[in-house]
Amino acid sequence: MSTYTVTAIRTGSRTGEAVGAPDLPPLAFSAPPEFKGRSGIWTPEHFFTASIAACFQTTFEAIAEFSKFSFQGLRTEAEGTLEKTDTGYRFTRVRIRARLTLAPDADRERGLRLLEKAEKACLISKSISSEITLEPEIVVATAA
């Protein structure tokens, strides 16, 4: 079992710093502007979607390594939809756009299967109640 502890410290009106392990830099955050926070600073909503994108990315890399599948690049974008529901605001769905770049001779179908496997295995996605949708894109790198 692993545990991860983060402390939020208030630095001003609806702003603060997230402090993790001693070797991690603190992250400034604010409520989003629509909730009377400051613009130009990370928000908890950004942290939420960033954790999904980062988890998907690292999960795919681990699966690809284990599967001995080579790829040239992966760009992952997570877009969370925040909606007001009968129980209050919540992320109802998250769209993961994953762009996998492969060498011309790579197995595109295998790459797609591994992207789908990563979406199912990502521990952050599995831990939330939002609907998760994967929009994979496979591109072939051009010869330099």
Image (cartoon, rainbow, N blue to C red):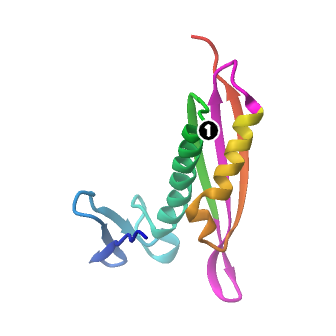
Residue 54's spot in the image, x, y percent?
A: 51, 52
Residue 103 is drawn in which quadrant?
top right
Give left or right: position of 77 versus 39.
right
Q: Nearer the viewer, residue 79 or 32?
A: 79
Q: Nearer the viewer, residue 75 or 44?
A: 75
Residue under pointer 1 = 67
Residue 83 is drawn in which quadrant?
bottom right
Q: Residue at x 64, y 27 (%)?
A: 102
Residue 68's spot in the image, x, y percent?
A: 59, 33
Which residue lies most toward the bottom here?
87
Please identify the quadrant where the C terminus is shown.
Answer: top right
Residue span colored magenta: 81-108
Q: Nearer the viewer, residue 138 or 40?
A: 138
| Secondary-structure class at tag 1 | loop
Please identify the quadrant where the N terminus is shown.
Answer: bottom left
How many residues crowd around disc 1 within 10 Å: few (fewer than 14), some, or many (20 or more)?
Answer: few
Tell me, yes or no, whether the highlighted magenta stretch contains residue 82.
yes
Q: Residue at x 55, y 61 (%)?
A: 49
Residue 98's spot in the image, x, y percent?
A: 65, 44
Query: Eyeballing the image, is 72 above or below 118?
Result: above
Tell me, yes or no, whether the highlighted magenta stretch contains residue 78.
no
- Residue type at mark 1 is Ser
Residue 95 is drawn in which quadrant?
bottom right
Query: Eyeballing the image, is 56 above or below 13?
Result: above
Give left or right: position of 6 versus 34.
left
Residue 119's spot in the image, x, y percent?
A: 66, 54
Which residue lies most toward the right here?
109
In terms of secondary structure, what is the magenta stretch mainly?
Answer: strand
Q: Residue at x 32, y 64 (%)?
A: 28
Which residue lies most toward the top here?
144
